[in-house]
Image (cartoon, rainbow, N blue to C red):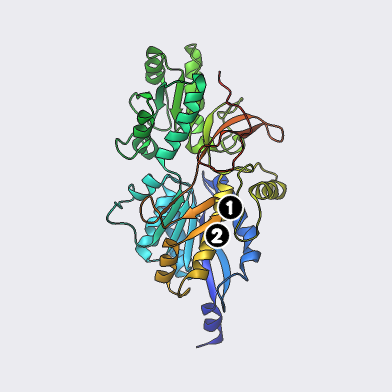
Amino acid sequence: MSESHAVRDRVLTVGVAVARSGRLASLGDPLDFALTWLEPKLAGRGPAGYSMRLVSRDTRSCAEGARQAVEELVGQENAAIVVTLAGTEVLPAVADACEAAGVPCLSSTFPWQVYYYGRGADDDRPFDWTYHFCWGLDDIAGVFADLWERVDGSRQQVGCLWNDGPQGMWSRHPQRGFAPVARSRGHRLVEPEPYREPATTFDAHVKAFRDAEIDIVTSAATGRDLALFRARAAEEGRQPRLITCSRWLAYPPSVIREGTPPAQAGVGTLAYWTPAHPYRSSIDGMTAAELADTYEQATGRQSLQPLGLAYALFEVATHALTTAGDPTDRRSIATALGRTKLHTMAGLLDWTRGPVPNIATVALAGGQWQPGTRHDYELAIVTPGQVDGLSVTGDLVTA
């Protein structure tokens, strides 16, 4: 064996599929930051006799770019494992490409039902190579119901602003979506026909919500579409007392940049990682608050929730490589992922308990975008939800 091949065989490569161009580039910032920050720390943390390196490829914010990124990471860089996050089309494309190539993949920031069932797995036929950690649509519904019930302490009629894409389709799925859990809590959902994204009008929704005297609206809209709905409702003299929204509205105004005040103003959303979360990295002991502060000082930008999950991707990948029976064998690495139970920057991630194979869940709290002290709007924790030890940092404010 040549010296160059011997050296390569002693290096374990973590491939990173990350959006550095296109519409998801801002959501790629946390993953790119975590890669840059952790690379020197991980170099010496491989299993005995091995070093680690991190190599990235740009997904270009599209499915085609995602597939090409995987091809290059596997074919050119000999990636032992690929990590990624974010993107309704991009994340599944990365995972599917890894499944086809026979290389372990770890991903996050995508409701697990959409990732799992939406990609064709079922309870009896899981994936071979692809693993994921995230919350579920049922978890979002539970957190949002907590917020709705704080409006006046009772069950509510809730207007649903669903699009006709995967977000809306899975949210209203009769068995595996958001809607069944919301209804099981005693809430009545008013669901007009889904709208095509990007929306051009919300006249039918505004009328339906007006006729039903809706005070609470929930959605997974983009910032642009939510701003359009709010403007149209205001023209009709309607102002919901509370709007809850996931997806893009979980990110700060600096990411979306829609309107003044921003689309996030007063919106209740899921809180899966904030500086207030009582989490600590398994790699360097850094706390959530320290990571958020480090990111803001280094980039000059407000931290956003995927930062904690991006950090955890590298923690879990490192753990899998160091606990695999043979870190040069991809099947051994995949097996190690499936038995991982690890406290990380994203909380406890446990693949041994499901809810289905290949999935670990992330605990959710309830947040609301409120005027801040360091930034124009900050995500206040208004209910701790499923997160043990998380302190409330603000009261829910309604119109």
Residue reaching furthest bottom? 1
Q: Which of marks 2 and 1 is nearer the N terminus?
A: 2
Secondary-structure class at tag 2: helix
10 Å crowding of disc 1: few (<14), some (14-19), many (20+) = many
Residue occupying image coordinates x 45% and y 20%: 154
Give the vertical position of 154 relative to 143 (above or below).
above
Secondary-structure class at tag 1: loop
10 Å crowding of disc 2: few (<14), some (14-19), many (20+) = many
Q: Say if residue 113 shows up in the picture.
A: yes
Give the vertical position of 391 relative to 33 (above or below).
above
Q: Where is residue 100 in the image (x, y as percent from the top left)?
A: 35, 62
Q: Where is residue 130 in the image (x, y as percent from the top left)?
A: 40, 59
- Left or right, residue 88 beside residue 259: left
Badge 2 is on which residue? 314
Work out whether residue 361 or residue 191 is closer to the camera in this orientation and state it: 361
Location of the C terminus (image quadrant): top right
Q: Position of residue 258 (x, y in %)?
A: 56, 30
Badge 1 is on which residue? 345
Q: Say if residue 228 shows up in the picture.
A: no
Residue occupying image coordinates x 48% and y 73%: 327
Q: Are marks 2 and 1 in contact (CB under 8 Å)?
A: no
- Left or right, residue 256 beside residue 108: right
Work out whether residue 76 or residue 111 is closer to the camera in this orientation and state it: 111
Q: Which residue type carries mark 1?
A: Met
Q: Position of residue 80 (x, y in %)?
A: 47, 69
Q: Mark 2 or mark 1, which is nearer to you?
A: 1
Residue reaching furthest front? 389
Mark 2–mark 1 Cα distance, whole angstroms, equals 10 Å
Count of numbered badges drawn on the protein: 2
Give the vertical position of 47 relative to 397 (above or below).
below
- Left or right, residue 52 beside residue 72: right
